Amino acid sequence: MPYNKNMKNNSQLQVRVDAKTKKEVQKIFDNLGLDMSSAIKLFFRQTINSKNLPFEIRDENGFTLHNVQILRESVASAKNSSKSFKNSSDLLKDVLKD
């Protein structure tokens, strides 16, 4: 292998993930034209640029942390309210109309 003077500045990173996760993310990266290494470098660069995670964290239902907080506050408010609702959909419609 020829000597590359920039190699001394490189650092290796090993990450263990389950096979299913790797396969799913590899398919997405392939569709985007990225290899695994380039995608991780892109993630790191965007983290540096934003000085934060470059995306909103979501739970398994797709809610952001902010959405979860609003939902919890809405539920607490509804419990303390004289209003009643037949279902959660009606509750959310009432909350969101404000």
Image (cartoon, rainbow, N blue to C red):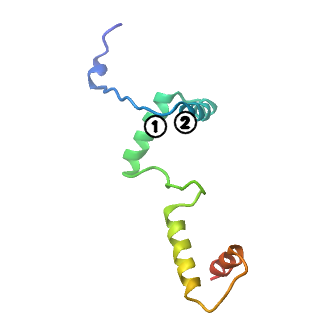
Q: Residues within 10 Å of mark 2 (few under 14, many from 20)?
A: few
**Label annotation for residue 92:** none
Answer with mark 2 or mark 1, whichever residue precedes in sequence.
2
Of residues 26 and 37, which is closer to you in this image? 26
Q: Mark 1: which amino acid? A: Leu
Q: Is residue 65 above or below residue 86?
A: above
Q: Residues within 10 Å of mark 1 (few under 14, many from 20)?
A: few
Lateral position of residue 6 relative to residue 42, left or right = left
Give the number of the mark in front: 2 or 1: 2
Label 1 element class: helix
Q: Is residue 68 above or below residue 50?
A: below
> Which quadrant is home to the N terminus?
top left
- Name the residue rendered at 53%, 67% in the picture: 68
Tell me where residue 76 appears, x and y as whole percent. Answer: 53, 80
Lateral position of residue 30 relative to residue 11, left or right = right
Tell me where residue 77 appears, x and y as whole percent. Answer: 55, 83
Query: What residue is shown with label 1?
Result: 42
Label 2 element class: helix
Query: What residue is shown with label 2?
Result: 21
Residue farthest bottom in this picture: 82
* Residue 33 found in image quarter: top right
> Which quadrant is home to the C terminus?
bottom right
- Name the residue rendered at 60%, 35% in the picture: 24
Q: Mark 2: which amino acid? A: Thr
Tell me where residue 29 appears, x and y as whole percent. Answer: 57, 33
